Image (spheres, rainbow, N blue to C red):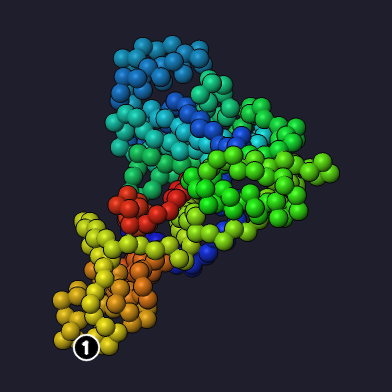
Amino acid sequence: MKYFIGILFIITSVYSQTIKDISSVVGIRQNQLIGYGLVVGLAGTGDKSKFTMQSLQNLLRNSYIKIPTSSINSKNIAAVMVTAELPAFARQGDSISVKVSAIGDAKSIDQGELLLTQLKGVDGTVYALAQGTILSTPTNKTTGDIFNGAIIENELDYSLQDENDITLSLFKASAKYADLIETKINDRFGSKLAIATDTRTITAKKPADMSIVKFLSIIQNIQIDSDFKKKIIIDMQRETIIAGADIVIQPVTITRDTFTLRIKKTDLTNNDWNDPAKNMGQDIGDSVKIDQKPTIINLDNALVNTKNLPTVSDLMRAMKVMKLPIADIIETLKMIKDLGAIDVEMEIRG
């Protein structure tokens, strides 16, 4: 079993709050791409769905090989859906990663070879071509990733150079932060360039003697004293999790097949932790203590005592002691978020 070892080396990285952290620029966005393809080279773990055989027949016909579908009898191929995100300002020749998911009854597509697949946007235009070897995670063999597995063929028609102003959109509506951003921008340039048009939208006019790129760079890096947005980044390829050190977890209990997580408050005082007669029944197990305080994370064999409410960083320490695989850690974080015990944006990278 592969364990998640490097998780704590970067878990305490703190995100500084800037305008870029809590807002996006209207017009600059990613776009979703999708395509249908075939994976070959599977060691008997593919599918025998009719549409898979039909797809293979069509592919062979394009190579001037004509055979009836009934004569195709192989479990070394699988039909898949391929998805990707087209970044803003992506250029022809750029590479992007893709995610591949089986849609038939294939048991595994791991190490299979995705044949050349067109990736289209909602407008039907082919924006990228994908091909390459699929790498799956140990816990799910019917989905996988191809790092830099697609090449951009067409670009989105959007020119930032021609813009004379920019419009910022807050990730969450807030009159307080819309007003704060307006004030910060105007103070930075010493002129009334920005105006908040509503609780999510701020428009800023570019100075005549400055390029739009430099103007945008300055605005996005203006510091904001705020905990408006917190983020957890999960990188599946590098098997790392990056999170702010101050992301608080509210009391919650999660029971899974391999462990039980309990984040709770206790009436024990600081001194009571050293008294076995008093802390019996607290399910302490093998203690890993950070300070001697009455809030705990109890994860079967790992106990973490924190100053106040525990943070994601504290939870990762307990999970490191448990040597839990990355799949369990990611699912646990998702469940905690779904239960409302943490208020963060979660980004999972392939």
Left or right of residue 184: residue 208: right
User: In terms of depth relative to the viewer, which is nearer, 110 or 331?
Assistant: 331
Find disc 1 in the rendering and name its residue. Answer: 275
Q: Quadrant of residue 39?
A: top left
Q: From the top left corner, tell me how far across and down residue 238 is, in percent.
A: 49, 55
Residue drawn at (40%, 45%), measured in percent from left and top?
136
Q: From the top left corner, tell me how far across and down residue 179 is, in percent.
A: 58, 50
Count of residue discs: 1
Residue drawn at (34%, 30%), measured in percent from left and top?
103
Residue drawn at (40%, 12%), measured in percent from left and top?
67
User: In terms of depth relative to the viewer, which is nearer, 311 or 101?
Assistant: 311
Q: Quadrant of residue 256?
A: bottom left
Q: From the top left corner, tell me how far across and down residue 15 is, in percent.
A: 54, 60
Q: Residue furthest right?
A: 209
Quarter of the picture containing the N terminus is bottom left
Q: Amino acid at mark 1?
A: Asp
Residue 87 shows in this picture:
no
User: In terms of depth relative to the viewer, which is nearer, 154 or 313?
Assistant: 313
Residue 196 shows in this picture:
yes
Residue drawn at (67%, 34%), measured in percent from left and top?
91
Q: From the top left corner, tell me how far across and down residue 40 is, in percent.
A: 42, 31
Where disc 1 sits, the SS reads loop
Category of crowding for the residue at label 1, using alpha-carbon neighbours closer than 10 angstroms: few (below 14), some (14–19), many (at least 20): few
Left or right of residue 340: residue 346: right
